[in-house]
């Protein structure tokens, strides 16, 4: 037996009885926290695939620790270098590009945890759904752009879509044991972000450094900016529609700065069921990976006496119009949510590069949405969604 065959045989022995897990975006905030959960339950998972855009330094450390069968590196040059340095030595197949991500999501795994940032996750998630792979979904942009396709593919193949986003995990948990038809509405909580109390004039002056600091959560750059503009909450409203099959009128948003109630479900009898916990993404990740089981872990309990109070207020859609634009996009339907998402995906890096002022993130989204009036495809195919997104990005950058 040569070294590679030995590697392969020890890998297959390792998989017996464990969940074979592929992580898209393993070097990011959600990806690394997913690996923390894997570390906490060493007998439960076999990490079969890891992937990143270009952070091969961290990916190499992860690959040496978890011995996946494949890694996917988006950047082809970095993928070639990685292959030379580690491919043979670690017995890892090195994939690249979107096709590589599609293979990583849909071959040789039981569950894919999608933690890439942006709608680059759409094709891989669809491939996973088509192949009956269970999907633990953090990558909300995918559902925003292609929710109808993903949910239909999941339904057809009988695979499972489990939320990782903390609000959706809270709703998912608050739905346990109840009938979907008894749901009156869901109430998604929002921290309000770092600029909750800022005036319009103060918002004009917000810098990337200020916007990259979130009061309650430590997350990747794009979602941190989205949280500050409330676009993240808007994307979550659309994500909730697809995850839970709700009408837009059944989805409410309330600002709750303490981020302890992660979201709630109100039933027809006006009873409200909520899920509470410390702000820590490893919990929703764990819930998704072990559903329907609840595993004991080493996290501290919520101390209600220390917490003392929880507060709520209406979101201000005038100061934070991105939320209203997302709600409008959901009502318009068709390709409009993909257009909203793509315009935002284009505008956020421009703000971070100092090329847009803070309020121009939302105004770019507004301008691009308006430019598409009359061009919305009602029941879009994958190519309609990809084309609309490309065109929306182009218009946002114009
Ligand atoms: P990060 O920016 O921290 O991580 C993104 C990951 O995806 C990294 O591994 C990155 O690789 C990889 N990646 C980025 N772009 C590409 C690409 N084009 N092709 C392949 N891989 C890519 O983001 P987060 O972990 O914060 O967020 C990930 C997703 O989860 C987002 O959709 C976000 O909205 C969602 N989410 C995040 C939460 C959080 O607490 N962070 C909470 C709820 C949802 P590299 O390191 O090489 O750049
Ligand atoms: Mg969230």
Image (cartoon, rainbow, N blue to C red):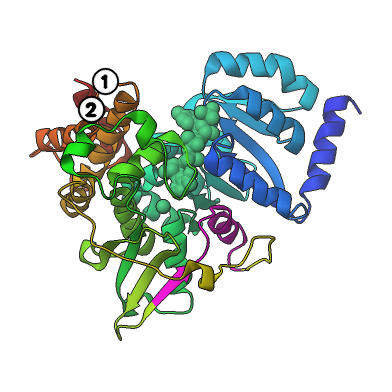
For label 2, count other residues whose C-alpha is less than 10 Å away and answer few (under 14), some (14-19) or many (20+).
some
Q: Are marks 1 and 2 in contact (CB under 8 Å)?
A: no
Determine the residue located farthest toward the left in the rendered image.
374
Give the residues in magenta: 273-292
Residue assigned mark 2: 357
Task: Give the CA distance from mark 1 to mark 2.
Answer: 7 Å
- Residue closest to the eye, 375 or 345: 345
Residue at position x 74%, y 38% in the image: 66
Q: Quadrant of the N terminus?
A: top right
- Residue closest to the eye, 184 or 318: 318
Question: Residue 252: x percent and y percent?
Answer: 26, 64
Does residue 189 lie above or below 354 as drawn? below
Q: Is residue 92 visible?
A: yes
Determine the residue located farthest toward the bottom in the rendered image.
269
Does residue 308 lie above or below 111 as drawn? below
Question: Residue 394: x percent and y percent?
Answer: 23, 23
Which quarter of the figure has residue 250?
bottom left
Question: Residue 236: x percent and y percent?
Answer: 34, 53
Q: Secondary structure at mark 2?
A: loop
Q: Secondary structure at mark 1?
A: loop
Which quarter of the figure has residue 208?
top left
Is residue 330 magenta-colored?
Answer: no
Number of callouts: 2
Left or right: residue 251 compared with residue 152: left
For label 1, count other residues whose C-alpha is less than 10 Å away and answer few (under 14), some (14-19) or many (20+).
few
Residue assigned mark 1: 355
Residue at position x 75%, y 31% in the image: 64
Residue at position x 89%, y 25% in the image: 2
Residue at position x 36%, y 72% in the image: 265
Q: Is mark 1 within 8 Å of ligand 1?
A: no
């Amino acid at each position: 037996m040569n070294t590679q065959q030995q590697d392969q045989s020890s890998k297959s022995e390792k998989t017996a009885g464990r969940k074979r897990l592929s992580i898209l975006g393993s070097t990011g905030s959600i990806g690394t926290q997913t690996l923390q959960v894997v570390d906490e339950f060493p007998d439960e998972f076999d990490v079969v695939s890891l992937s990143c855009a270009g952070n091969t330094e961290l990916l190499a450390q992860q690959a040496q620790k978890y011995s996946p069968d494949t890694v996917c590196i988006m950047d082809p040059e970095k993928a070639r270098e990685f292959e030379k340095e580690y491919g043979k030595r670690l017995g890892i197949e090195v994939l690249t590009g979107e096709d590589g991500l599609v293979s990583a999501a849909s071959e040789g795994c039981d569950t894919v945890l999608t933690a890439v940032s942006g709608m680059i996750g759409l094709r891989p998630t669809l491939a996973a759904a088509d192949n009956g792979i269970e999907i633990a979904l953090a990558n909300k942009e995918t559902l925003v752009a292609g929710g109808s396709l993903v949910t239909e593919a999941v339904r057809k193949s009988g695979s499972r879509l489990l939320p990782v986003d903390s609000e959706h995990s809270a709703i998912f948990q608050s739905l346990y044991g109840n009938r979907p038809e008894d749901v009156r509405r869901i109430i998604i909580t929002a921290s309000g972000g770092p600029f909750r109390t800022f005036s319009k004039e103060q918002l004009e002056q917000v810098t990337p450094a200020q916007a990259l600091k979130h009061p309650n959560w430590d997350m990747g750059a794009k979602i941190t900016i989205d949280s500050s503009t409330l676009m993240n909450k808007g994307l979550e409203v659309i994500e909730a529609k697809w995850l839970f099959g709700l009408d837009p009128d059944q989805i409410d948003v309330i600002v709750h700065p303490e981020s302890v109630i992660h979201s709630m479900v109100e039933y027809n009898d006006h009873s409200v069921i909520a899920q509470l916990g410390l702000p820590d993404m490893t919990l929703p990740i764990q819930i998704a990976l072990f559903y329907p089981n609840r595993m004991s872990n080493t996290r501290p309990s919520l101390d209600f006496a220390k917490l003392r109070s929880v507060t709520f207020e209406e979101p201000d859609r005038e100061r934070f119009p991105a939320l209203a634009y997302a709600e409008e996009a959901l009502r318009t339907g068709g390709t409009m949510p993909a257009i909203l998402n793509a315009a935002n995906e284009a505008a956020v890096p421009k703000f971070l590069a100092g090329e847009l002022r803070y309020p121009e993130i939302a105004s770019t989204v507004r301008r691009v949405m308006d430019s598409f009036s009359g061009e919305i495809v009602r029941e879009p195919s994958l190519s309609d969604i990809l084309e609309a997104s490309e065109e929306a990005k182009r218009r946002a950058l114009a």
